[in-house]
Image (cartoon, grey):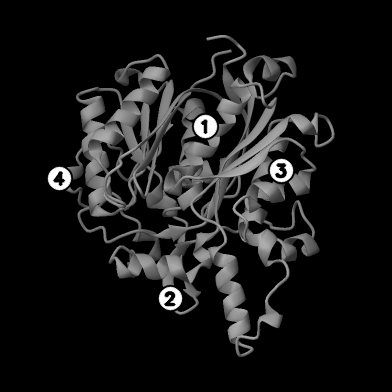
């Protein structure tokens, strides 16, 4: 592959329910530390959720925060952190050549619910409706808030890809760099959904909302006793560059993006299709120019719903068969389902394995569902496997949108 087509990650900015830096997040994953807690939410009362605790005012003022959104604030924090870690000075690059591509599950629900609640307290008098509502609810808001904050003049937009959005944002950044449309991409995914009572109510109506007396044990992918999804917020954004540009400025290269794929089930709105999941993984691996046995870690999407877990497990078995040195894990067991941020955060959590050679476990797995058995599923304790060369990151979403990304150890 030509250097103009080789794309590397040079910075990672994130906030997760159990860590606000890549180092803190990785430490929590290796220590078995969950970020799930109980919160009170409008109309639903006490629910379990993954809540982030980053400093909202680290990169923006109080006025800007009041005017903006939680998703925008998460994006601003993650983008600034990623640029800082990439060694990029805010004034040291051509801002017209920076693209911002942020994956989201949905946007605007939180803000609309808040405004309806505000006018409800004034007998539904719309004079109390905020004049900030329109810029808060447009779909491009999270990416747009980043460009306003950083003064970026390149293209920006959000990618609505349900729960595959974190991978989709990353893929879009890679594609725009390869097309020559930008020289630097800020790409990944974010989510503010825990601030919407509607998402909790909807999952509850489907009997798919997780509950456990101990919140830290509520998210239980692949476990026989799992009882649904834990909804979480968060964000993960990556700085992406062409390898030649990164080398030119002696950037700290984290890893290389070598393969990706997206496809559609074109079937049921919520039931995954294992054949299409397997097809997506296989295509990403093929585009990376490797074989399934070359993959070191498969980062699963599994949300702790029976149908989703079973279909993905079957697809993983179909693709990897008896590959003896492919290890499988899940990050949602620690942080719940961060929706638009899920794929980006789960990838970020596994990147540390290139340095330490350790696969973080799937926690809360007390009794494995026999239908979810997979060779080398890492359960409850980290597994040292030595050298990690490739990570396959799965992320799937409603209406049958599937994504898989292959990341390679950077070898210089």
Query: In the image, residue 332 lies at what x, y percent?
Result: 40, 49
Q: Position of residue 71 (x, y in %)?
A: 61, 56
Asked if the residue under mark 4 is in contact with the one under mark 2, i.e. CB atoms within 8 Å, the reply is: no
Residue 268 relative to residue 234: left or right: left
Observer-nearest of 187 and 334:
187
Query: From what the image shows, is residue 76 above or below residue 8?
Result: below
Residue 40 visible from this viewpoint: yes
- Residue at the image point whose x is 18% and y is 49% from the top: 369
The residue under label 3 is: 80
Q: Earlier in the sequence, mark 4 or mark 3?
A: 3
Mark toward the viewer: 2 or 1? 1
The residue positioned 80% from the left and 37% from the top of the image is 90
Q: Which residue is mark 1?
A: 171
SS at mark 2 in the image: strand
**Which image quarter: residue 69?**
bottom right
Depicted 344 relative to depicted 184: above or below: below
Q: Mark 4–mark 1 contact, CB under 8 Å?
A: no
Answer with mark 3 or mark 2, whichever residue precedes in sequence: 2
Q: Is residue 376 above or below residue 273?
A: above
**Viewer-proximal residue among 377 and 206:** 206
Q: Earlier in the sequence, mark 2 or mark 1?
A: 2
| Mark 2 lies on residue | 46
Query: How much space separates mark 4 and mark 3, taking CA atoms?
Result: 44 Å
Residue that badge 4 annotates: 370
Q: CA distance from mark 4 to mark 1?
A: 34 Å
- Residue 104 located left or right of residue 247: left
Q: What number of labels is visible?
A: 4
Secondary structure state at the residue bearing disc 4: helix
Q: Nearer the viewer, mark 4 or mark 3?
A: 3
Q: Residue at x 73, y 44 (%)?
A: 147
Within-10-Å neighbours for mark 3: few <14, some 14–19, many 20+ = many
Q: Quadrant of residue 295?
A: top left
């Amino acid at each position: 592959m030509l250097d103009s087509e080789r794309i590397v990650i040079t910075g990672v900015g994130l906030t997760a329910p159990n860590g606000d830096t890549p180092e803190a997040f990785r430490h929590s994953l290796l220590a078995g530390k969950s970020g799930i807690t109980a919160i009170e939410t409008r109309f639903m009362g006490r629910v379990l959720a993954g809540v982030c605790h980053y400093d909202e005012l680290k990169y923006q003022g109080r006025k800007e925060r009041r005017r903006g959104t939680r998703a925008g604030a998460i994006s601003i924090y993650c983008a600034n952190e990623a640029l800082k870690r990439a060694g990029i000075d805010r004034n040291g690059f051509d801002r017209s050549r920076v693209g911002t591509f942020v994956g989201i599950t949905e946007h605007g629900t939180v803000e609309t619910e808040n405004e309806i609640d505000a006018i409800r307290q004034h007998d539904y008098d719309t004079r109390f409706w905020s004049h900030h509502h329109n810029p808060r609810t447009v779909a491009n808001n999270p990416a747009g808030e980043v460009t306003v904050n950083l003064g970026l003049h390149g293209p920006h937009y959000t990618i609505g890809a349900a729960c595959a959005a974190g991978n989709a944002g990353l893929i879009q950044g890679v594609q725009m760099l390869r097309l020559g449309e930008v020289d630097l991409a800020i790409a990944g995914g974010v989510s503010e959904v825990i601030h919407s009572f509607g998402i909790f109510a909807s999952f509850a109506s489907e009997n798919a909302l997780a509950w456990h007396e101990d919140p830290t044990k509520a998210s239980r992918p692949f476990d026989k006793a799992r009882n649904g999804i834990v909804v979480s917020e968060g964000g993960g954004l990556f700085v992406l560059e062409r390898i030649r540009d990164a080398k030119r400025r002696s950037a700290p290269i984290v890893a290389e993006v070598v393969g990706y794929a997206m496809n559609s089930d074109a079937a049921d709105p919520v039931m995954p299709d294992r054949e299409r999941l397997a097809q997506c993984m296989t295509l990403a691996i093929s585009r990376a120019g490797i074989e399934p046995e070359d993959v070191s870690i498969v980062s699963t999407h599994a949300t702790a719903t029976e149908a989703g877990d079973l279909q993905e497990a079957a697809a993983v078995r179909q693709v990897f068969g008896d590959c003896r040195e492919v290890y499988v894990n899940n990050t949602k067991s620690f942080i719940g389902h961060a929706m638009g941020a899920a794929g980006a955060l789960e990838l970020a959590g596994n990147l540390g394995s290139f340095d330490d050679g350790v696969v973080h476990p799937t926690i809360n797995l007390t009794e494995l569902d026999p239908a979810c058995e997979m060779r080398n599923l890492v359960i409850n304790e980290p597994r040292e496997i030595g050298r990690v060369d490739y990570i396959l990151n799965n992320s799937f979403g409603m209406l049958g949108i599937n994504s898989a990304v292959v990341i390679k150890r950077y070898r210089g």
